[in-house]
Image: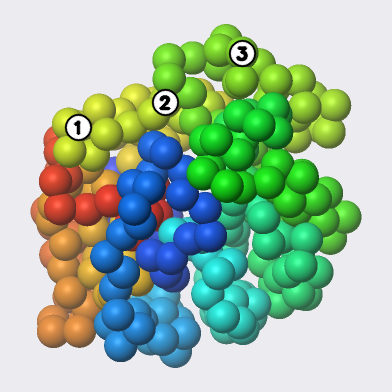
Amino acid sequence: MYDRFNRRINYLRISVTDRCNLRCRYCMPAEGIKLISHEEILSYDEITDFTRVAVNMGIDKVRLTGGEPLVRKDLPVLVEMLAGLKGIKDLSMTTNGTLLGKYAQQLARAGLGRVNVSIDSMDPFKFTWLTRGGRLDDTLEGIDAAIENGLTPVKLNCVVKESKDEPDARMVTSFAEKKGLEVRYIRQMDLGRGEFGVVEGGDGGNCARCNRLRLTSDGKVKPCLFSELEYDIGKPGAEQAIIMALKNKPACGTVNRRGYFYNIGG
């Protein structure tokens, strides 16, 4: 399927929760957030039903995001449900990696193809500071578990201020080279100010080539991360929400003062 700028839209990012077990400084305030009530969160059946419609319309690439997707109970069950949909060629997940050591085997058996793991520093103290309490060893254990269970290629997401030449990013690069992993360098973004850039090592941030739609955990289809446009799948239904998102997908991102990375999926 194509939007009004003739961009082929084949990629769906699904935020399964706004919860997270870390409090990364560029993503979430120290005092925490106002969480979406459990009653508003889409069930696994609802997510699967929506995705089935999206796949029938042309989506063939699906990524699970959060918050942190693995804090949602029984996530491998959803993975298995989605993996059973004919037409999905690429089923992946973005995670902070802290729970991958526990769940990597279950995820692989359920049908997950690969993972992107967020890691911004190889200094244990800096990592703990950036994440407000996270343990680098947990994420490293998760990366190893992903590799061992075939969730490959494992890609690392590294947030930078300006470029991959910053000291922390260079440490991540060195680690990736030793492990044979790819790195995506993501310049720190600001939704409210409309500050974003093209991801080095990936396709994100390139508006002219954007192929994405997003489904929030409470059932809104968003045509763009840097836009306040969203369409409720409950009222018009999944197909109509997707059609409206395609029809109104902007040529380029602007600002989003109502959404946050933790509840859209970054």
Residue drawn at (25%, 28%) of the image: 195
Residue 117 image offset from top left, x and y in percent: 63, 46
The type of residue carrying mark 1 is Gly
Kind of residue sitting beneath label 2? Arg
- Whether the residues at callouts 2 and 1 have beta carbons within 8 Å, the answer is no
Where's residue 261, x and y in %? 34, 49
Whether residue 159 sits left or right of residue 216 in the image: it is right
Q: What is the C-alpha distance between the residues marked 2 and 1? A: 13 Å
- The residue tagged 3 is 167
99 lies above or below 128: below
The residue identified by callout 1 is: 194
How packed mark 3 is, by other alpha carbons closer than 10 Å (few <14, some 14-19, many 20 or more), is few
- Residue beneath the point at 59% across and 67% down: 70
Please report the residue visible at 67 percent of the width from the left and 55 percent of the height from the top: 98
User: Mark 2 against mark 3, which lies toward the viewer?
Assistant: 3
Front one among 5 and 198: 198
The residue singled out by tag 2 in the image is 187
Q: Is residue 119 above or below residue 173?
A: below
Closer to the camera: disc 3 or disc 1? Answer: 3
Mark 3: which amino acid? Pro
- Tell me if I can see residue 20 in this picture: yes
The answer to which image quadrant residue 106 occupies is bottom right
SS assignment at label 2: strand
- Helix, strand or loop at label 3? It is helix
- Mark 2, Cα crowd under 10 Å, few <14 / some 14-19 / many 20+, is many
| N-term mark: 2 or 3 | 3
- Identify the residue shown where x is 70% and y is 29%: 122
Image quadrant containing the N terminus: bottom left
In the image, is 183 to the left or to the right of 199?
Answer: right
Label 1: element kind: loop
